[in-house]
């Protein structure tokens, strides 16, 4: 669980760490250039949804990059990690060639290291707090690349360590939703000795990791190994089970569950409510990506095919928009276009995703906003009418507000449109649990530092609380909820057992 500052400092003083600190001078560490990860050729990788873009690091690259880490007395990088990974300790294990130990350090606080090494925005979290960035104005240590390396090395070695778990205390806990938040929570509760069962509405475990993120960014096989590790820790999974319909919270209480963690996500598509939006060929990014990622709609002989088109327009500028437009390219689109109402600088998508999309031939129509969809005689979309925008003063998000330019409208040919302008919280749990306080946006209200809802035995985190966020922030919520639910359950149930 959480490691104190004293623990982190004492670990740094271990003999092997001190030897590494002395072995290479600081100026020699600083002279090493940050590693560049090799990638699959863009012309080859767009031939399949299943070809991962990034290749990972070699052992030699990983060890050399780990040498750049200064093993700071005050590791500010850790301040930027929502799941509190002991970053210097895992990196120094890589430097000395103990890759399995590096992976074990990651798993002390992260249930999904191979996932995070691929999809976390490290550049605005741990890496932004790196000594190199803060003090030297140089590129940070490639913490994300090294995290991926250690997790991948362990998986490929076949010697996967299972984190240590406390003796079972017999208290049953239910997790609603098997996305990153639910999995992170489940892992921490299993370590604490609880009897954990995860209920998933879909037929596959993984939530947004499976249905929302394409395999060219995050292979399903990588996710499955991390889920299997949770199974080996004693976590149980039940699929095709919709809490609120298959069974209520009250039903589960009767089965002996003492507390609940809601990590049901934000899977409700959001549209723009503009004319023509109900035309055939206009899909939400949720449907588009789920059909391809989870249901194999990219296969020519798929039972559940997805619409393909020569000209595909994706509306939005986040990571989901990038995933959608790059998927369209792999499904054979001749023109795959991003239409985004702000400039590229304001795009919330990761810089790496934008870079990869450009490599793959995606067109970016920025400062452009759809105002109408035009259908053919059969009701199928054929054009998107757009309007040019200019940037005004910053709005509540801190980004400059887009303002329409009168008389700048024009049409774009489009046979498929994917709308990726955000999502809303899944309403099922908020609507089916009496007494649960919900915000006007449909998110579950929680005590921020505890993740506890208005119903004491119900905790929640991830997108059902945040309304849409990153994988790692959702995981951080899961860890925080686990720590606080443990306190709640010990006070309510386990202290009674001790007294008896």
Image (tube, rainbow, N blue to C red):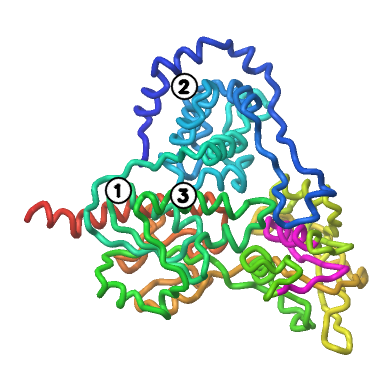
Disc 1 element: loop
Q: Residues within 10 Å of mark 2 (few under 14, many from 20)?
A: few
96 with respect to 60 (left or right):
left
User: CA gap, disc 3 to disc 2?
Assistant: 24 Å
- Which residues are the magenta region? 305-328
Q: Position of residue 306 (x, y in %)?
A: 73, 73
| Residue topped by disc 3 | 476
Task: In this rendered view, identify the residue nearer to me: 49 or 321.
Answer: 49
Q: Which mark is residue 422?
A: none
464 with respect to 259 (left or right):
right
Q: Dividing the picture into quarters, in which one does residue 28 lie? A: top right
Instruction: Give the number of the mark in front: 3 or 1.
Output: 1
Identify the residue shown where x is 59% and y is 46%.
120
Quadrant of the drawing holding the N terminus: top left
Instruction: Give the number of the mark in front: 3 or 2.
Output: 3
Is residue 149 found inside the magenta-colored segment of the image? no
Q: Residues within 10 Å of mark 1 (few under 14, many from 20)?
A: some
Q: Position of residue 52 (x, y in %)?
A: 70, 48
The reply to whether residue 387 is visible in this rendering is: yes
472 with respect to 357 (left or right):
left
Looking at marks 3 and 1 on the same chain, the residue that comes earlier in the sequence is marked by 1
Identify whether 277 is placed above or below 489. below
The reply to whether residue 444 is visible in this rendering is: no
Looking at marks 3 and 2 on the same chain, the residue that comes earlier in the sequence is marked by 2
| Residue topped by disc 1 | 192
| Residue topped by disc 2 | 73
């Amino acid at each position: 669980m959480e490691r104190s500052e004293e623990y982190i400092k004492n670990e740094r003083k271990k003999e092997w760490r001190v030897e590494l600190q002395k072995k290479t001078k600081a100026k020699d560490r600083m002279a090493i250039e940050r590693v560049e990860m090799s990638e699959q050729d863009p012309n080859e990788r767009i031939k399949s949804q299943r070809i991962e873009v990034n290749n990972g690091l070699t052992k030699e690259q990983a060890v050399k990059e780990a040498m750049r880490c200064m093993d700071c007395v005050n590791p500010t990088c850790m301040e930027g990690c929502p799941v509190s990974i002991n970053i210097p300790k895992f990196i120094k294990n890589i430097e000395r060639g103990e890759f399995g130990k590096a992976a074990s350090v990651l798993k002390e606080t992260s249930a999904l290291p191979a996932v995070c090494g691929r999809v976390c925005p490290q550049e605005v979290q741990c890496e932004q707090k790196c000594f190199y960035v803060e003090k030297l104005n140089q590129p940070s240590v490639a913490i994300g690349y090294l995290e991926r390396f250690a997790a991948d090395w362990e998986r490929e070695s076949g010697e996967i360590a299972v984190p240590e778990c406390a003796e079972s205390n017999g208290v049953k806990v239910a997790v609603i939703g098997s996305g990153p938040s639910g999995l992170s929570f489940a892992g921490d509760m299993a370590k604490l000795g609880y009897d954990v069962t995860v209920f998933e509405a879909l037929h596959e475990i993984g939530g947004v990791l499976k249905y929302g993120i394409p395999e060219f960014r995050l292979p399903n096989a990588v996710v499955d190994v991390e889920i299997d590790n949770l199974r080996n820790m004693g976590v149980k999974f039940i699929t095709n089970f919709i809490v609120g319909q298959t069974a209520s919270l009250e039903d589960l209480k009767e089965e002996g569950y003492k507390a609940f963690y809601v990590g049901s996500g934000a899977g409700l598509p959001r549209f723009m409510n503009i004319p023509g939006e109900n035309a055939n060929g206009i899909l939400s990014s949720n449907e588009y990506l789920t059909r391809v990622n989870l249901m194999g709609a990219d296969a020519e002989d798929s039972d559940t095919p997805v619409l393909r088109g020569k000209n595909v327009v994706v509306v939005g500028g986040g990571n989901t928009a990038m995933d959608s437009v790059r998927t369209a390219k792999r499904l054979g689109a001749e023109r795959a276009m991003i239409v985004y109402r702000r400039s590229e600088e304001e795009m919330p998508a990761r810089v790496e995703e934008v870079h990869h999309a450009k490599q793959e031939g995606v067109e970016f129509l920025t400062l452009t906003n759809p105002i109408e969809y035009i259908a053919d005689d059969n009701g199928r979309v054929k054009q998107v009418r757009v309007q040019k925008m200019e940037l005004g003063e910053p709005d509540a998000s801190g980004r400059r507000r887009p303002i329409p330019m009168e008389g700048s409208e024009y049409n774009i040919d489009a046979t498929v449109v994917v709308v990726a302008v955000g999502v809303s919280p899944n309403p099922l749990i908020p609507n089916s649990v009496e007494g649960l306080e919900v915000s006007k946006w449909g998110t579950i209200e929680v005590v921020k530092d505890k993740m506890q809802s208005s119903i004491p035995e119900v905790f929640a985190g991830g997108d059902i609380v945040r309304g849409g966020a990153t994988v790692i922030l959702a995981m951080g919520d899961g860890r925080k909820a686990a720590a606080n639910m443990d306190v709640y359950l010990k006070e309510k149930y386990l202290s009674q057992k001790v007294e008896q």
